[in-house]
Image (spheres, rainbow, N blue to C red):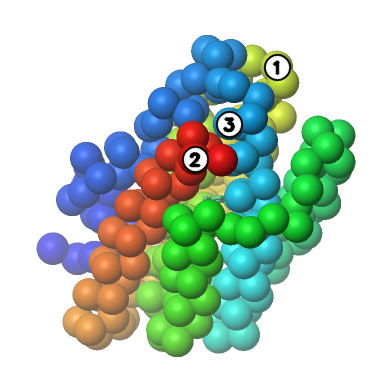
Amino acid sequence: MTLTCASLIEKYTDIWRDATVHPFLQQCQAGTIQLSQFNTWLVQDYLFAVECARMLARLVGVAPSDHLDILLSGLVSIKDELQWFQRNAATRNLDLNTQPQPTCREYCHLMASAGQQPYAVQAVAIWAIEAAYNQAWRKHSPMPEPYTEFGDRWGNSNFSAYVDELARQADAAIAVADKTQHQAAEAFFLDIARLERDFWQMAYQG
Ligand SMILES: Cc1ncc(CO)c(N)n1
């Protein structure tokens, strides 16, 4: 079977479901999440987003020129996202200068390690990361206040279109990559799915 982004989700349905359906999201949607749990997730996700920006920037360094437009638009969005996290943290009186929890730290290391991989593998990895959040928030939408803006940020149709473009670019790159790269891309997908599941769980370990 040809390796594509869609084929990875098809092959690992259960693992992908666990990455994108979680009590944290269900409790946000039900309005029953505790403030401290939500805030714990928010701070950890800011720390994640900083490293994700660096990963995207590294992709810009190695991508073919006809893939740059999408990646640069991702960087512009993440610039806005980091400022949005900072505003949100200030309103909630949260200190963003916090230690990452073990899961967040492991996820950040994984993103850093992607920089040693060929472009095709990095392209699959960034798609998996963005697709996980897009699907997770969409599956639990609409979110009630005060979580509506969180659901909208990753569940909106522009972000969905961006994720589709990332998949198209990753598919094109992986189609001409060798077997070693296919195996590495699949391994990254599985690590990302596991870490996404564990990332939601961190909210309860604040
Ligand atoms: C854990 C996690 N995965 C993906 C995204 C999307 O950028 C995010 N903000 N946080």
Taking 33 as reference, is 145 left or right? right
Q: Residues within 10 Å of mark 3 (few under 14, many from 20)?
A: some
Q: CA distance from mark 3 to mark 2?
A: 8 Å
Q: Amino acid at mark 2?
A: Gln
Q: Are marks 3 and 1 in contact (CB under 8 Å)?
A: no
Residue at left 48%, top 29%?
A: 24
Residues at badges 3 and 2 in contact (C-beta under 8 Å)?
Answer: no
> Are there few (<14), some (14-19), or many (20+) residues within 10 Å of tag 2?
few
Q: Who comes first in sequence, dot 2 or dot 1?
A: 1
For label 3, the residue is 37
Q: Which residue is mark 1?
A: 145
- Which part of the image, by quadrant, shows the N terminus? bottom left
In the image, 81: left or right of 101? right
SS under mark 3? helix
- Whether label 3 lies within 8 Å of ligand 1 gets the answer no
When the figure is inspected, residue 162 is found, relative to residue 37, above or below; the finding is: below
**Residue at numbered disc 2:** 205
Q: Nearer the viewer, mark 3 or mark 1?
A: 3
* Residue in view at x 45 percent, y 77 percent: 114
Nearer to us in this view, 48 or 10: 48
Q: Is residue 78 left or right of residue 63?
A: right
- Depth check: 42 or 100 in front? 100
Residue 96 percent coordinates (x, y): 75, 52
Q: Residues within 10 Å of mark 1 (few under 14, many from 20)?
A: few
Under circle 1, the secondary element is loop
